[in-house]
Image (cartoon, rainbow, N blue to C red):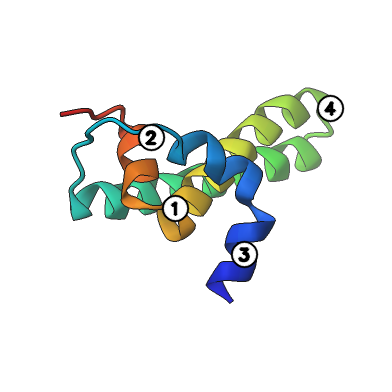
């Protein structure tokens, strides 16, 4: 299942998994990335909900941005390699 999902999300993962240089990785970075992704997904849900309740079409753009950031964080933290997680953090040794 994981290999199928990695193939499906390869365009996103290839961006963060590219490179040959050294990188600094900690397991806590992956955990924090999952939490941050979940928070962005919650925030996008709240923005879409508030936009719907108050009939504001202007909530669509921030909701989509938060959704894209949240999904990217969740995808990289669950399916990405250690290098991808490290690249999301901007860590290099």
Q: CA distance from mark 3 to mark 2?
A: 19 Å
Q: Quadrant of residue 55?
A: top right
Q: Nearer the viewer, mark 2 or mark 4?
A: 2
Q: Secondary structure at mark 2?
A: helix
Q: Which residue is mark 1?
A: 80
Q: Secondary structure at mark 4?
A: helix
Number of residues whose C-alpha sits closer than 10 Å to that of mark 3, classed few (under 14), some (14–19) or many (20 or more): few
- Quick check: 78 left or right of 83? right
Q: CA distance from mark 1 to mark 4?
A: 34 Å
Q: Residue at x 20, y 55 (%)?
A: 27
Q: Secondary structure at mark 3?
A: helix
Give the numbered dot on residue 88: 2
Give the numbered dot on residue 57: 4
- Quick check: 71 left or right of 53? left
Number of residues whose C-alpha sits closer than 10 Å to that of mark 4, classed few (under 14), some (14–19) or many (20 or more): few
**Cβ–Cβ under 8 Å for marks 2 and 1:** yes
- Quick check: 63 left or right of 88? right
């Amino acid at each position: 299942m994981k290999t199928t999902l990695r193939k499906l999300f390869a365009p996103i993962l290839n961006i963060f998994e590219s490179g040959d240089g050294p990188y600094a990785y900690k397991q806590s970075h992956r955990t924090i990335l999952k939490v941050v992704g979940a928070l962005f997904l919650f925030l996008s849900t709240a923005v879409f909900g508030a936009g719907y309740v108050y009939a504001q079409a202007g909530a669509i753009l921030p909701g989509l941005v938060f959704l894209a950031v949240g999904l990217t964080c969740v995808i990289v933290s669950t399916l990405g390699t250690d290098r991808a997680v490290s690249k999301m953090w901007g860590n290099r040794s």
